[in-house]
Image (tube, rainbow, N blue to C red):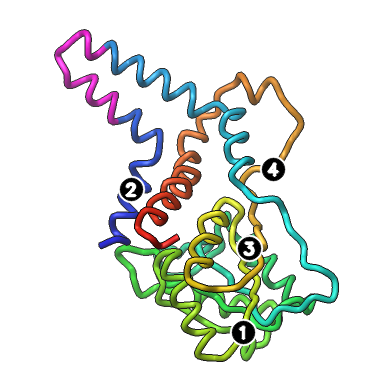
Amino acid sequence: MFFILSKILYFLLIPLVWILILLIWMMLTKSKTRKKKLLIAVVVISILFSNNFIYTRLVLAWQPQQTTIEPGKVYSAGILLGGMVGFDINNKGHFGEGADRFIQTEKLYHQGLIKKILVTSGSGELLRPGLKEADFLEQELIASGVKKEDIIIENNSRNTFENAIYSKKILDSLHIQGPYVLITSAMHMPRSEKIFTKAGMQFVTFPSDYHVTRMPFSFEDAIVPKLKLLNDWAYFLKEFIGLKVYQVTGKA
């Protein structure tokens, strides 16, 4: 149930959806005063949530700084969180926007900085629960030169809380002691760090897949609206609200 609710919540966090709902409401209402107020709301939302300057500054404040592994430091395992794979109509897997976390993980392994890789990700599909992201990533890791015996698969989790709980159980059962290297996107790292800490795991963070990077100030970014952001905001809002919900429920 929580998994389904999270999917619905994510849809409702898209500013473009808010605008569409307000426009439909505006067309259906007969009150001229309400129509005017709804139109003002549409304009305000459109301006604020399409402003790249506002968006980038908030995301930059949210994302952690890039980190490096100390030379000569070797960790027992890297924990790779999923969320970078999609499946087409033929159930064939493919990498999406978050593939950088996969690239960074295999680099850490080939550089000898992590001995093993734990991939934690079940199915993100509501209608195709049998498609396991971790299984796809295992094959891709092997294809990139990672030894099969150095890959640990956790393919039952469907959210970050389950990522942490199931990962801890597996690592404890295999007697692989921390600290580990936690690898996920920079946007997702603040929530992941809190949840994995709450689960009682010792780790260092290795954020990747930066959604926003620091760029020189541009008047164009501050003035010219970017309609793409009306969809991108959902990612940030999902992480921010998700962390607050997990904190309230005692999971982070």
Q: Which residue is mark 4?
A: 213
Q: Which residue is mark 2?
A: 9
| Image quadrant assignment for residue 5 | bottom left
**Where residue 2 sits in the image (x, y, percent)?**
29, 61
The earlier-in-sequence mark between 1 and 4 is: 1
Q: Residue at x 28, y 11 (%)?
A: 36
User: Dot 4: within a 10 Å radius of its alpha carbon, few (fewer than 14), some, or many (20 or more) residues?
Assistant: few
**Where residue 27 sits in the image (x, y, percent)?**
22, 20
Give amino acid for label 1. Gln
Q: Quadrant of the C terminus?
A: bottom left
Q: Kindly give the residue lying farthest to the right in the view shown.
A: 71
Q: Which span is picked out in magenta?
A: 21-35
Q: Nearer the viewer, mark 3 or mark 1?
A: 1
Whole-angstrom CA distance, mark 1 to mark 2, is 36 Å
Label number found at residue 177: 1
Q: Are marks 2 and 3 in contact (CB under 8 Å)?
A: no
| Image quadrant assignment for residue 39 | top left
Q: Which residue is mark 3?
A: 101
User: Dot 3: within a 10 Å radius of its alpha carbon, few (fewer than 14), some, or many (20 or more) residues?
Assistant: many
Using the image, determine if residue 230 lies above or below residue 65: above
Whole-angstrom CA distance, mark 3 to mark 1, is 22 Å
User: Dot 2: within a 10 Å radius of its alpha carbon, few (fewer than 14), some, or many (20 or more) residues?
Assistant: some
The earlier-in-sequence mark between 2 and 4 is: 2
Give amino acid for label 2. Leu
Q: Residue at x 69, y 73 (%)?
A: 106
Which of 58 and 19 lies nearest the eye of the viewer?
Answer: 58
Magenta stretch, main secondary structure, is helix
The earlier-in-sequence mark between 3 and 1 is: 3
**What element does badge 4 sit on?**
loop
Whole-angstrom CA distance, mark 1 to mark 4, is 34 Å
